[in-house]
Amino acid sequence: MGLMDFLGMKKKDLSLDQVKREEIKLGIRETQTLSKLEKLEKEREEIFAKGMKIKSPPRRRQLARLYEAKSSGVKMLERELGVLSKEITTMSALKLALERRTSSKEGVSRILERVDEARLMTYLEDDKISQEMYLEKLNSVLSSVTDGAREITEDLGKEGSEVMDVWQKMDEGEIDTFADGLKLADRAVRQKEKRDSEMEAE
């Protein structure tokens, strides 16, 4: 079931627990999709390696077709992974909004009635809209839900950003070795965990 189907079916009686369960389901789907993607990428690499060794044109042509088919599959799964990531972010934002509004007389249904599902669906399906851009769009969609919409979305989608920064630096040649990159990533994650625990203690 897609995110829009879930919201459409449950709009009238959607509870915070249902949103949390759907968030978990989406996380499982994301993990499964990533596993399929990694398997397909490995198969594609093996086909390419085999084509390098084989000199027969007919066999190479057959392997080239297989490689292209696997590449199409990779592209499709990458797109699916992108949509899932946005859906998880959306569900997390809704969960936070609902948690803040549990004492409100408007209730859950009132919050979801004010979400423009058509706009949200467009943003979810558009490959040109990155995760960062989607967060901005999501904030505008949820702006009528709560006065603290900016606060709700500002931390979402930033999970793993410290590690992403390390990879970016490795891409740009600022970090020379794998070992150095791993060390910096571990340090960044530990520092984030320390900051988070200090914030929770306040």
Image (cartoon, rainbow, N blue to C red):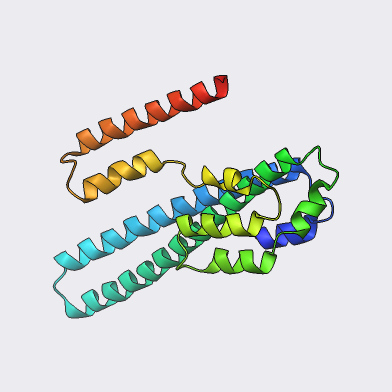
Residue at position x 66%, y 42% from top?
96
Judge whether residue 25 can be spotted in this image: no
Residue at position x 47%, y 56% from top?
131
Residue 55: image x %, image y %?
13, 73
Residue at position x 51%, y 69% from top?
126
Residue 100: image x %, image y %?
71, 39
Camera-side residue of 176 and 196: 196
Quadrant holding the N terminus: bottom right
Locate residue 142 relative to residue 57 in the image: left or right. right
Camera-side residue of 154 and 157: 154
Residue 157: image x %, image y %?
50, 47
Locate residue 118 relative to residue 13 in the image: left or right. left
Residue at position x 27%, y 32% from top?
184
Counting every numbered tag in the picture gives 0
Residue occupying the far top of the picture: 201
Q: Quadrant of residue 193?
A: top left
Residue 158: image x %, image y %?
46, 44
Q: Quadrant of residue 179?
A: top left
Quadrant holding the C terminus: top right
| Location of residue 41 with respect to 92 vertically, above or below | below
Judge whether residue 28 can be spotted in this image: yes
Camera-side residue of 135 and 38: 135
